Structures are given as structure tokens and as C-alpha cells.
Image (tube, rainbow, N blue to C red):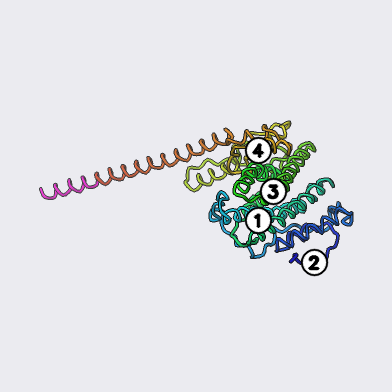
Amino acid sequence: PPPVLPQTRLTKSPHEPNRVLNTPCPHDKAALTDTIASLWGSGDIALAYNPNPDAPHEAPPDKPARDDKVILVEPSRAGRLGKGGTPETRIAILHSLAHIESWAIDLSWDVIGRFGRKRQMPKEFFDDFVAVAVDEARHFKLLAKRLETLGSHYGALNAHDGLWTSAEETCNSLEARLVIEHCVHEARGLDVLPGTIAKFRNNGDEASAELLEKTIYPEEVTHCAAGVRWFTYLCCRKDATCGDFEIDDQMLVPGEGPLDGGLNPSGEEKHTRDESELLKKLSLKTLANPEPRLDKNASTQTKFHRIVWRHFRGVLKPPFNDEARLKAGFGKEWYEPLQFRPEWEVRGAREERREFDAFFEKKRKDEAAAKAKADLEQAKARAREDSNRAIFLL
């Protein structure tokens, strides 16, 4: 049966994204997405946000509502999907894709509600991400229907919410959200989707292969393109930062690192050899990241790389789908340098390790010297006792 829309009155207000985010059922999220998008497209939602800074604003939830139909596990326990050689593994792949699309619905509305008003984005930004939300909702519905055709359903298998974890890590930065979600994660989807399509086709599941190849794959290219387009827009608008970091509630100068100059957040450089203080100092240095300053005229690609290094723990692994990535608007100069961590980061880590090792080596030597001194004093005391005993016996 078709999903029943939640009994929530649509007020045709700028708060519509939160209605999706606060709806627990993914099927209802998809249906509500279509309804809101229709209102937006028809002009019934007149404002993307109230430009009055004093107007009440309903912040997005920290995490979208989710029902308990899908059991969430740690990513390490989610299991490998397999090569599609059996009906069970093909269902597992489709279930994983449906789960990703269900979260992508939330991510699309979250970027609208969290950053649209805050960064005073133009109407075209909202047009793009409403369209992305509609695509993701359609993808979810089609994948869920395909699962049912194969005798399963969405929620039949465990899943993880690792995609939202990265969204939480970029909740303070529109630039980081665009780069990590759309230009790293979704672009990785472009890299692997042709292989996934081949798995279905090679194992006789032409219907699933067609769904991925004709509908989902080309539309995912446009989602990556939205990330590239709006990140580039922010850079051209001259108010893009490499993370929107805040220290003591003060916004940083655009384009500068949070702790440039090697100082800790208090602005003081500590020089203590106490173990706990050293560990604290090393922790602060790790947090600071020994990154060089960005030139005020740094290119869009250079800012892109800096954001990836700040928010993405690993490296980008080939093979890359160069053709699809180029269609999305970013060539090899955007992503090929990200196959290796930057030298300044590796060098900083080596220096920290040397300082850490030197501290404990000195501590070991100091403890050994103190023990040797104590042993010597103890030996001298025993010698005095033996001497006194000998004199007494005489």
C-alpha cells in the first residue's frame, strides 16, 4: 500500500525542511519530500527563509528522526555486501543502496535548513537542493519497490548510519558539507556504481542494472555537480572559509586556519615537562594541525583540498570515474592530489612523535639516574653500618 503521509499540517513556511527531518518513517519522508517540492515549485512556499535576522528560526534537529524498522549496527559489523552472485547478496546490495538514499533525503533537507538562511544563499541554491531531495526520494522509492519485487523489503537487513556521522562532523560548515558529502562521498559513488551495475547485469538481474544505470547513476552526477557548483560559488563570493571554525565564539578570518601560528586556543605556548601537561600539549598540537597558512588568493581547488584534509580521515583511492566526475564539474586536479596525505601533515605528525619519544626517553634516563643515585646512597649507608659494626667489635 502507498505510504500514509504523517498528519502534519503544511504551513507553507520556510520551516518545511524540518518536517521531513522530524518524520521517522523513510517512506513518509519520501512522500513528504514530493509534497513540499511541489509547493516550492508552484510558488506556494513564497520564501526560502525570512530575511529578518530577528525573525524566529527553527533550527534543524541534531539528528533526523528515524523509526526502528531498520536495526542500526556499527559500520564494522554491517558485513560485506558480496559480489552479487546470489539472490541474497544482490538483495543486500540493493538494501544498502536504499538505506543510503533514505539518509540522502535527510541530508538534502538538512543542508537547506541548516545553512540556507545562515549563509543567505540565493533562491537557486534552494532550487538545486530541493531537486536533489526529490531525486533521492525517488531513488529510495524505486529501490524499496525493487526489494519487494525480489521478495524482501527495506528494513529486512541491518544497516549503519555512517553517512550521517560525517554530516554531524560538518554541521558547522556549509563548505565542508558540500565538499565531503557531495564531492567526496557521492563522487565515490560515481566511481563504484559502474562496477555495481556490472554485478547485477553479469548475474542476470537486468531490471536492477537498468534501474541503477538509467535512473540513479546519471542523477547522482547532478548531485555531485551541485556540490561543486555551490562550493565554487562561495569561493567566488569571497566569504568561503576552510571549515567555519569557531574559537571562543569568534568567527575566523576567511581562508585562515583555526590555530595558525602554532598557538593553543588561549594564545599561550606552554613549556612544561610534566607528563600530563606534555600529553595535553601534544593533544592540542594534534588538534591544531600544523597546516601552513592559505594565501588569500588561494585557488578554489586548494581550498577544496584543505577542507578534505581537515574533515576526511583517509585518502581518495583509485580507480576514479574520470568521465562522470568531469561531467559533475571537477577534473583530475580536484581529486588526484588527494590520494596521499599532505607532507605538512605527515611532517607535523613525525615531529610530534619525536617529541613524545624524546620526553619518555628523558623520563626513562632520569628515572634510571635517580635509581642509580638511590642505590649508591643505600650502598654508602650499608658501608657506614659495616664500618661502625667493625669498630664496635674491636
Q: Which mark is residue 210?
A: 3
Helix, strand or loop under label 1: helix
Among numbered discs 1 and 2, the one appearing first in the sequence: 2
Seen at 28% across and 45% down, the residue is 375
Label 4 with label 3: CB-CB less than 8 Å? no
Among numbered discs 1 and 3, the one appearing first in the sequence: 1
Label 2 with label 4: CB-CB less than 8 Å? no
Percent x, y of residue 228: 73, 40
Seen at 71% across and 37% down, the residue is 255
- Asked if the magenta segment contains residue 392, the reply would be yes
Q: Amino acid at mark 4?
A: Asn
> Disc 1 and disc 4: Cα gap in Å?
23 Å
Q: Which mark is residue 321?
A: 4
**Screen quadrant of the N terminus:** bottom right
Left or right of 152, for residue 36: right
Q: Amino acid at mark 1?
A: His
Instruction: Name, please, the residue furthest toward the left.
Output: 394
Residue 282 to residue 5: above or below: above
> Disc 1 and disc 2: Cα gap in Å?
24 Å
Residue 364 to residue 142: above or below: above
Q: Quadrant of residue 138?
A: bottom right
Q: Amino acid at mark 2?
A: Thr
Query: Does any portion of residue 242 appear in the rendered image?
Result: yes
Helix, strand or loop under label 3: helix
Q: Which range is magenta? A: 380-394
Helix, strand or loop under label 4: loop
